[in-house]
Amino acid sequence: MRIIIFSLRVFAFAGVIGVFILLPLNCTGDQLEDIDFVDFSNNSLDVFTISNVNNGSNRLWVHFCAVYVVTIFVCFLLYYEYKNVSSKRIAYFYASKPQPHQFTILVRSIPVSAGSSVSDSVGRFFREYHPSTYLCHMVIRRTNKLRNLINDSKKLYRRLIHMQADPAQQKYKRSSRFGLFGRKVDLVDQYEKRLEDLEENVRFEQSEVSLAGEEVRAAFVSFNSRYAAATAFHLQQGINPTQWLTEEAPPPDDVYWPFFSSSFMRRWISRLVVIVSCILLTILFLIPVLVVQGLTNLSQLEVWFPFLKSILTLTFVSQVITGYLPSLILQLFLKIVPPIMEFLSSLQGYISHSAIERSACNKVLWFTIWNIFFATVFSGSVLYQVSIVLDPKNIPAKLGVAVPAQASFFIAYVVTSGWTSTSSELFRIIPFIWSLMKRPFVRDTDEEFEVPSIPYHRDIPRILFFGLLGITYFFLAPLILPFLLIYLCLAYIIFRNQFLNVYAPKYETAGKFWPIVHNSMIFSLVLMHCIAVGIFTVKKLSLAPTLIVPLPILTLLFNEYCRKRFLPMFVAYSAETLIKKDREDENDPSMSEFLDRLVTAYQDPALMPIQYSVHSDGLNSPLISSAEV
Amino acid sequence: MRIIIFSLRVFAFAGVIGVFILLPLNCTGDQLEDIDFVDFSNNSLDVFTISNVNNGSNRLWVHFCAVYVVTIFVCFLLYYEYKNVSSKRIAYFYASKPQPHQFTILVRSIPVSAGSSVSDSVGRFFREYHPSTYLCHMVIRRTNKLRNLINDSKKLYRRLIHMQADPAQQKYKRSSRFGLFGRKVDLVDQYEKRLEDLEENVRFEQSEVSLAGEEVRAAFVSFNSRYAAATAFHLQQGINPTQWLTEEAPPPDDVYWPFFSSSFMRRWISRLVVIVSCILLTILFLIPVLVVQGLTNLSQLEVWFPFLKSILTLTFVSQVITGYLPSLILQLFLKIVPPIMEFLSSLQGYISHSAIERSACNKVLWFTIWNIFFATVFSGSVLYQVSIVLDPKNIPAKLGVAVPAQASFFIAYVVTSGWTSTSSELFRIIPFIWSLMKRPFVRDTDEEFEVPSIPYHRDIPRILFFGLLGITYFFLAPLILPFLLIYLCLAYIIFRNQFLNVYAPKYETAGKFWPIVHNSMIFSLVLMHCIAVGIFTVKKLSLAPTLIVPLPILTLLFNEYCRKRFLPMFVAYSAETLIKKDREDENDPSMSEFLDRLVTAYQDPALMPIQYSVHSDGLNSPLISSAEV
């Protein structure tokens, strides 16, 4: 997955163009001489922005042309990137080995007649309507309880291993036993006993779950060819469109087992609830933040913590606190947004980790744009922001006034937030601190270490937001561009390093994140056009606002064309592709073996037999052995 | 197709409920006594509207409850009607005989490699990817020229028949030949010769079109089962999503042959152009109408037609002209809207008459709502209307003020426009006048008579518009309801008669018009809620506007649920349905014969062999003989 690097390239290209066209424009030579470059306060930066250009000046027409040129250039790049990514996606599919999810669909909302099980119902339906292609199915079961048990036993097992491996600790425990007249039993023995009990429990639960009810009305259904699976996925199966709902199966290790709501209504309602709560969170997020920030002014602190009084009277300390505490609080609040959004997405009924992260990525993106861009630009109350959105006629004018005023803030934002976040990414400070904090409590961090995967829903929105800043500000305050370019180069180098050396991809979506990038860029362009209309109106360049109007329309048409031309390739593979790939495999001798393995491919990991207890000799065997259920 | 009757029933139900709840509400007894029922001017009607209720009066809460009750009732009816129509649709499909369009898809944007024809390309593609199900295909050819030739020869043939059948005319012509020394040839002979020439031409063109180029990059592709056709229709065929575009084929006699634009881009652009021109037509329609109406004031008429001066001075004449001329002009302009919308839809790239009419129906509906409802309510300039739409916050308040003021106008509108249009439908005045006017010029009307089909795109929007009036006004001015009910009963009786005795259905869409009805009703409900919010604000019923707000949200959610639950059934049939139907046919011995006939089912009528000339003895054979191409 090199989407991030792709997008970096696009932004870098666009940025370079912007710099070369517009950098020398906004300020004349003599003004430049007046600037005290050491004191980079807001006032001096304003010299570089469009505010410095006289009303109705002809130099504004250069800005006007720049808007056109950059829009065309960005659209051109977007088109080729989309084409590139989609062709890479097809190539990846052709090059891929047969994978279970290519042959499988997920069926939900299975209607069950009284007296028969879900499994019977699925088998009967697909044997009747797809007799020549249907292979097997795997009904999903509710395993939340089981999963907790297994987690418990896993933890216990780890502790046991650790104890056995660390003789010092073991001896100490033993001696303590002897010292206390045998009342304390051997800890290892005790743990082993508890582990055995737990395993017994797990096995009992497993057999119970497998045999009796607990069936969710959903199943993975496998077919003997990719084309057959795609056919079943694309056609509405049952007469009632809310039953027999099909979707593409994710790869087995990408399945998000905990949340399998099956009924159509329940999923629909939870989707609605999640969307509403997301919108509320996005719109109202700043209220608690402002409250907390308001609480942290100096006098309040003095009241709460009287002992700090002496320190707070020092000018330096009070300056640091008033300057950095509010922004630190904001940053901390922002840090918890991606996990919250991920959690909300997981409630939405997605069945794979990748889909959850993709949806969370979108949510975080809009959250960032609203809460950082619009909240800064219209630095009023939430109601004021909402009232602006509800008054579409005046949006450009208001943007035209408010956006240029914040240029220096966003330049500073690129430096403070962008540069530091990227650099801190290199050191992965938070996971580092987290592991430091965790070490004293959890005794077996060595074994638990997993290669981390990059949280796309945290990083992609951030990069896209800087892209939005670059595109909206390039013609207002071209000075932002060098800073952005430095950020992008830094990010390119660092993320390249991280991808190669630190992170391991948890799943492969074959470029499915690209449409998010594309949409965000299109939104940035249209927003930029709105701002341009507003600014040229404010600057009294009479004809320019009217001449800008076709640009957003053309951009949206371009987007519409791209949606038709490329988006379907990201949703599903074409019949041509699937059949070609199927034909390729027909001559492959390993295919029959692969199809046999499909039967157990979508086994819930919680239902795999487990065997940790020391009586077996499989202490070092993999945790999840290949099952034979 | 009984959609109209269905919708009549829904409206009648809703109307009855409205009458029984609200009619006695708005006016107290003593006020009623004051009314002079003979003089039904605006002022007296206002007594029956909500304007008569005091601000903040408790009686307003009854209106409030009525809004809730009627919304719930209408939604309930809508749900059951949707369910009813969709189950009828499935039942119709099960009961239908094998029809060519069930086995066929239309493929457009076929990519052609250099040196091969479209036909080769289609054959190769489907033989490769659907070897077991592909049956045959029929490439579409550009036959506009040919169609004109055939029309010419058809006309000539008719005239000839007429001449031979009418001995008087024939003799007269003959005698004139003798009278003028043979310089005038026998007209029959002359016509026969010209007909032969034309036929020769047609045959030449036909062979030319069939052999050489003129291929459109589109083809009807038939399969050996419904399921196979549906599979090919649902899956994206080619890797490039803008090539090998598939859609369901219409029945052969429903195909709209003249306009087959094939390239993806051209269709997309023409779609955009049509949509834009529709929106412009809808928004700007009133401007030319107002101009024309302005030109027809009395003094202007006197300037143009000085000879009318003496007549115009008569009070009666001038009253009639000033009173009725403007509304007559508006009615005439409105009459030409459905054909214009139909023409625009036909440019949009639809391939069947039914799809064109369905799209035109939607367009006319929105046109009517905008140009009659909103133009009357906000009786200002177009710019004022647009500015209201662009200012969403104030819409309810403005509606709340403006809508009740127009109650008496719309009651009058129901009587004048609704009652008269329905009654005139019984006599079909315009076709009657048209045929009267045409008779002197076209000499063979007897043979040309075809059973007319009802223009759905003219009548459905009108009925739906009255539904909108009923729903938006029932709680403001319940007096509209008896008038509407009379209209609906009248329409029910008349349309039932027309369907049974006058019109013949030209095509069968199996209920595909229903979603339009459903959407229009939902829009009416939400509009009614907006008005209610506005009115309760104006009437200073403090809590009510807030309590109404959940209602439109719930209505829209209900609509969303219906879209998920029923709409897919109107788009395509499910795998279950198709496979069941296919299995049923497997045992039918006539199926193989039917499949053989599929080869020529989608033959362009213009390419059928024609034979009119008198040398053949097939004078009375059907015009379009069953072809053997």
Image (spheres, coloured by chain):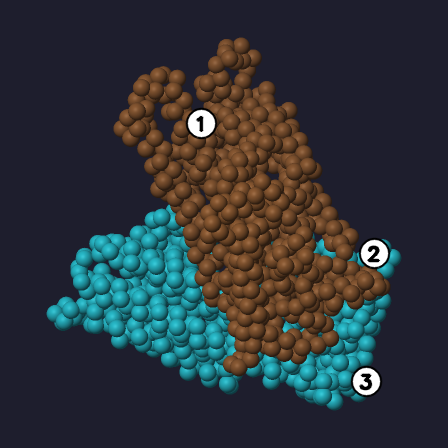
Chain colours: A brown, B cyan
Residue B255 on image: x %, y %: 66, 71
Q: Is residue B567 visible?
A: no
For the question of whether residue A410 can be seen, the reply is: yes
Chain under numbered label 2: B
Query: Looking at the image, is A192 positioned above or below residue A553?
Result: below
Percent from the top left, x then y, of residue A140?
58, 66
Please, what is the three-letter code of the amino acid marked with disc 1?
Ala
Select label 2 or label 1 by which is in front.
1
Q: Chain of mark 3?
A: B
Which residue lies under the disc numbered 1?
A405
Badge 3 is on which residue?
B616
- Closest to the observer, A437 or B91: A437
Give whichever of discs 3 and 2 has the lower sequence position: 2
Q: Are marks 1 and 3 in contact (CB under 8 Å)?
A: no
For residue A14, which quarter of the picture?
top right
| Label 1, label 3: how far apart the Cα atoms are | 88 Å
Is label 1 in a helix, a strand or a loop?
A: helix
Q: Are marks 2 and 1 in contact (CB under 8 Å)?
A: no
Q: Which mark is residue B113?
A: 2
- Residue drawn at 81 percent across, 68 percent down: B127
Location of the C terminus of chain B by quadrant is bottom right
